[in-house]
Amino acid sequence: MNEIDRMLRAALKSRDQSAIAQLYLAAAEAQFDIKENDSAWFLLTHAYIHALEAGLPIAALLEARLKAENRA
Amino acid sequence: MTQQPDVDALGDVMTGIAHAKGLPNAAYTSAAHFEAEAQQVFARNWTAIAFAHDLAGPSHALPLEFMGQPLLLASDQTGEIRVFQNVCRHRGMILVDAPKHVPGALRCPYHSWCYDLTGKLRATPHVGGPGHNCHEAIDHNALGLIEIRSHIWRGVVFINLDGTAEPFEAANETLLDRWSDFHAPPLPAGDDAQFELDIATNWKLAVENYCESYHLPWVHPALNSYSRLEDHYNIEADGEFSGQGTLVYRQLKDDAGRTFADADGLHDTWDEAAEYIAVYPNLLLGVHRDHSFAIILQPRAPNRTTERVAIFYHQPEMLGADFADMRRENTALWKTVFEEDISVVEGMQRGRSASHFDGGRFSPVMDAPTHMFHRWVASQFLTDERD
């Protein structure tokens, strides 16, 4: 289990929405870095949904990224 | 006629009070009648479901159930309150299962479709496949939460589930005019000014008992020292509400002689008057110069009702710590009164198991508000009467 996975499991357990969104985003960016785009958009979707639920400013940015790819 | 429980018995209710009988036993004991009331009585009228102050403030959501309907009370970021059916438009999952602060969006716990607090569908993750969060078949503008027509008056949230009732102000024009002196929104006073009573009775018996003064000297004997039966008067507005008023309201005073502050701009008639009105179907209201209260009747079963009681004040200073002891005393006084009624409404419920009881007769003088309520309930099952 990598560090992001470990931290994400802890954040999900403690229902820390901000951390969950940030960690899904970090995981998505890591997938983009290695050209695993399908996985990356899946993870970025999760970052967006948790950010939206929590009312985090980053939600608007993530939505814009998804819309730019016709994914939201 | 629709879902008519007993035509002949309802005919006996509709006749003049001198010869009328009350609603038949089945109206209080039958599960089928109880289910019929959900549609005939509650869905098509303005029904009280909650207090506005049940929501902790803006950006909150509160699930509740009324006559089997899963509802969601929600306040958006501006504090505007709406009522929705508490189901996701995707697979009908219950959306919210506990009161919560909603900083951003409501997320369905099943597939995470998200809605904002105005009901708009905001996100449908993976709906077009993994990482594809839109699809031409899923129109966000058409799939918002199902909003229920609602209105807030005197701190109470009303709904008209089937959307067919007249606008609230028109349906309640007579009462709004009657109590126009109490136009300012009442101020809820928190936990020391509200309580619940869980009662083994049909909701209608709570209404019937509330809207007449006939029982006061017998069930509330403490009133006899200053409030005679002849100091009370009947209040009747056919098809809308009924109740009773008193001409000898006595304000609560503390040891220093303080009273709760009056509402602004009251006419002199309210100096010693108070009125207690049952707003059909399920809201019991009381107004006094210095405070008011509301009782929402939540039918749980044919023989079970929860009374949610909240006391309100007219002036913000009455909500402070200076008046906390008086507020608690006032709450305790009303709780005593309403608890005194429990034995009679539960006794009448048990009496509805008497197979030869025929609905009972009314005092033509004292029971007019009660008979008016019976007629209204009966009329909800008689299409001709309602149209």
Image: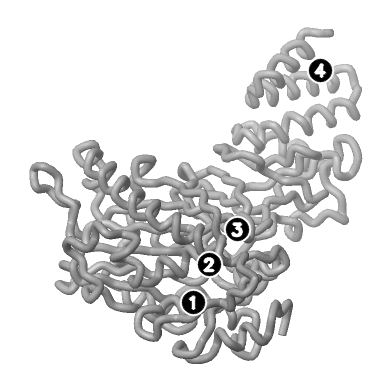
Disc 2 vs disc 3: which is toward the camera? 3
| Label 3 environment density (alpha carbons within 10 Å; few <14, some 14–19, many ≥20) | many
Q: Disc 1 designates what residue?
A: B373
Q: Which mark is residue B204?
A: 2
> Which label lies toward us, 3 or 4?
3
Q: Disc 1 or disc 4, which is closer to the eye?
A: 1
Where residue B321 sits: x, y (%)?
Answer: 23, 36
Find numbered disc 1 in the image and state the secondary structure of the residue it sits on: helix
Q: Which three-letter amino acid code belongs to the residue tagged 2?
A: Lys
Residue at 47% across, 67% down? B207
1 and 2 marks in contact (CB < 8 Å): yes
Secondary structure category for the residue under label 2? helix
**Label 4 belongs to which residue?**
A30
Q: For the residues tagged 4 and 2, is the chain the same?
A: no
Q: Position of residue B128 (x, y in %)?
A: 89, 44
Label whose residue precedes the other's in the sequence (1 or 2): 2
Give the CA distance from mark 1 to mark 4. Answer: 69 Å
**Distance between the Cα atoms at labels 3 and 4?**
61 Å
* Tag 3 residue: B303
Closer to us: A32 or B296: B296
Q: Is residue A7 above or below residue B346?
A: above
What is the distance, in whole Å, between disc 1 and disc 2 at their CAs? 9 Å
- The chain holding disc 3 is B
